[in-house]
Image (tube, rainbow, N blue to C red):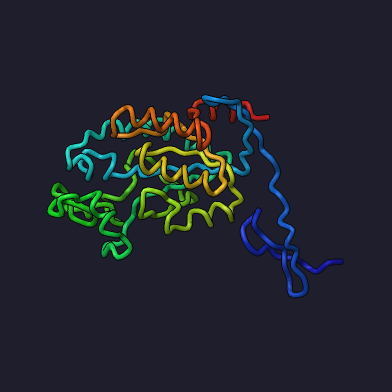
Amino acid sequence: MNPTLRTLGMPPNAWSVNAEMADITRPPMPQRLIDFPTDTKELTVDLAKTACIVVDMQNDFCHPDGWLAHIGVDVTPARKPIGPLKTLLPKLREIDVPVIWLNWGNRSDLLNISAGLRHVYNPSGDGVGLADPLPKNGAPVLTKGSWAAAIVDELEQETDDIKIDKYRMSGFWDTPLDSILRNLGKTTLLFGGVNADQCVLTTLQDANFLGYDCILLKDCTATTSPEYCMQATLYNVNQCFGFVTDSEKILESVAGRR
């Protein structure tokens, strides 16, 4: 009779061990399949291997007192994903699909941020850029722990949600996102958030390059850029980087899951 084995790690990337032996076979998770249509094909997806990444639904990008609004951008489009996400995320949690909040959360000293990156947010050098206080409330722009970098109040974060700070448009650069996804055994990624043509797209592209299967949820994604930028994003995801659908199709499939 084998002595008691204890789990080391997080299934499915876990061993069973004791003082004498280690079982490193990593048994697969039971499949939980759903089918739904996308813009290009009917997909079959395993919920056991799926996670949802929500990008940059933060005050600085989505609130009328945030940084984008301060520089004169109409943030109304950036708020459009709030409603669909409020419906989708609780349902994903109910079926054990992890929700990952991927947000700008810079160091206050900006030691890992280059001049080129700072230039995007303060091209003249004398404006309000990264880590500078917002005139309306004094919150430092996109600084970890600040109101500016916080998720908008309308979107509720749960204790078991995964929170990852990022420092570039792509959430895979200089962050633990890839390691976390691999430890969780997630290979299919649902994407939502803002801006579709910037942080969402670059993160999705890097996910594709790393071998993840990418699905952009168009009703959960938006941009304050011109409409042609959104059109180009949808075209390029469909053409090169994955699939495009909407959250209602996911929810309908989950409700009728086989």
Could you say which is closer to the camera, residue 107 or residue 256? 107
Q: Position of residue 249 (x, y in %)?
A: 53, 26
Could you say which is closer to the camera, residue 145 or residue 190? 190
Q: Residue at x 70, y 44 (%)?
A: 30
Q: Residue at x 46, y 32 (%)?
A: 217
Q: Residue at x 53, y 41 (%)?
A: 189
Tell whether 68 sits left or right of 85. Answer: left
Q: Residue furthest right?
A: 1
Task: Please state, as top left, top right, bottom left or bottom right, where the N terminus lies in the image.
Answer: bottom right
Q: Position of residue 231 (x, y in %)?
A: 38, 27
Q: Position of residue 80 (x, y in %)?
A: 34, 30
Q: Residue furthest bottom?
A: 19
Q: Residue at x 20, y 42 (%)?
A: 65
Quarter of the rendering containing residue 69: top left
Could you say which is closer to the camera, residue 89 or residue 50? 50
Task: Please state, as top left, top right, bottom left or bottom right, where the C terminus lies in the image.
Answer: top right
Q: Is residue 171 above or below residue 45?
A: below
Quarter of the rendering containing residue 199: top left
Number of callouts in the render? 0
Q: Position of residue 101 (x, y in %)?
A: 43, 47
